[in-house]
Image (cartoon, rainbow, N blue to C red):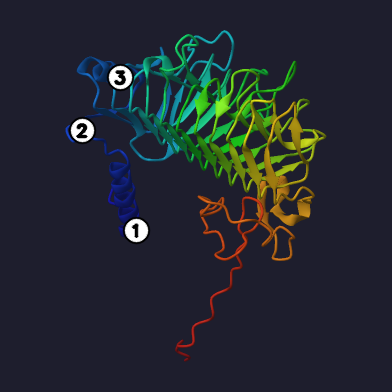
Amino acid sequence: MTLQPTRFYLACCVALLAAQSLAITDAFAETILVDSVPALHAAVNSANNSGGDTIILVADGTYTLNDTLYINVPNVTISSDSGVRENVVIQGDAMSATANIGNLIRVAARNFKLQGVTLQKSRWHLIQIVGESDADSPEIRDCILRDAYEQMIKVSVDQNDLNTSADNGLVENCLFEYTAGIGPQYYIGGIDAHAAKNWIVRGNTFRNIISPDTAVAEYAVHFWNDSADNLVEKNLIINCDRGIGFGLNSRGNRGGTIQNNMIYHANNRGAFADVGIALHNSPDTRVYNNTILMEHNYPSSIEYRFPATTNVDIRNNLANRNISQINGATGTVSNNILNAQSNWFKNAAAGDLHLANESISAIGQGEPLFGLVDDFDGDARTDGASIDVGADEFKTTSRPLPPTDLLVN
């Protein structure tokens, strides 16, 4: 079958982009194309036996694993061959405490990349990044991660050696969700990272991380247990029990930035709806220009808690709940607007918290901040003395003028 010119052009573009995105430092990396479960397991084994430097391209299809994919060597990439993440599904046998497959992928080496695939159904995690093996610099891009019985991405650590950790990770443009609209138990979450440093979590969507019973679910994004200097920005979090957390009780976090995120929670979506953003034992953390609309009864959109939480900077956030200082935490809280209404946004019920029009009181009321150069969509923050409060920098758009050189018969 021959491709039509337009389809051929698009196919070439997709192939070129895929080739560029899969470039790794070793120009002689082996590339293996797989189209069956045995071939996928064999390709991972081959990569491990050869010392890494392997790109595994997975043909479109559904792959129900016989065992965890163990990545034990550096510079291994797993990617869809087509570049369409919905078309390549790698899955366990069930989302259940009794499922045969615990983790779908266990990464115990540096520079692992996962791109353009769907992962689903596990007893534990869809991906475990093994910090105790110093599995630095993982990249997870443009994937769908759904229906794990525990947290979808786990970054683990040896509690007796917090200095050996998985650092410099990237999770970008992924979808995390429970397709039933609610999770299977309370011990679930999106990204749960221990002792992780210098990670970027950007441009992802998290949906329906909701506990069905017993207790509140874990956060959509959680860095704790000696984590430090992570950036969480431009994410959309819809109907998750808790949004973004830095630190937890005595296992804290240091520094980092939470900015330009949109967090929405509808009324009657779960029995344990909780805070949008939380800093618990998280000194020197910046919380800038987030938009949080909560239609349940939890009183705080943002909270900073415990005496070790010092020198935090919370500015330019747009919300409809209080910012709460709890248990002796200290910091700067300014230029926040906390009386947001659902009609201020384009489509709040769908989680679209872009500003609806130029009359919203958040426009022009923010304070320019060092390092805050754009908004949720990547639009530049307005030059001058002020910016908009919240994740969206409002832009007016004009219809293009009609052409004036049309021929008239």
In the picture of the structure, the residue carrying the numbered disc 2 is 26
Q: What element carries label 2?
A: loop
Tell me, yes or no, if residue 324 can be seen here: yes
Marks 3/2 in contact by CB < 8 Å: the verdict is: no
Q: Which of marks 2 and 1 is nearer the N terminus?
A: 1
Left or right of 285? Residue 324 is right
Q: Which of 163 and 238 is in front in this view?
A: 163
Neighbours of disc 2 within 10 Å: few (<14), some (14-19), many (20+): few
Residue 397: image tag: none
Residue lying at the far bottom of the rendered structure: 409
How many discs mark residues in the rendered view? 3
In the picture of the structure, the residue carrying the numbered disc 1 is 6
Residue 308: give x, y in percent of width and height.
Answer: 64, 25
In the picture of the structure, the residue carrying the numbered disc 3 is 44
Instruction: From the image, state whether disc 2 or disc 1 is nearer to you.
Output: 2
Tell me, yes or no, if residue 178 can be seen here: no
What residue lies at 58% left-to-right and 36% top-to-bottom?
Answer: 285
222 to 404, vertically: above or below: above
Residue 408: give x, y in percent of width and height.
Answer: 48, 91
Q: Disc 2 marks which amino acid?
A: Asp
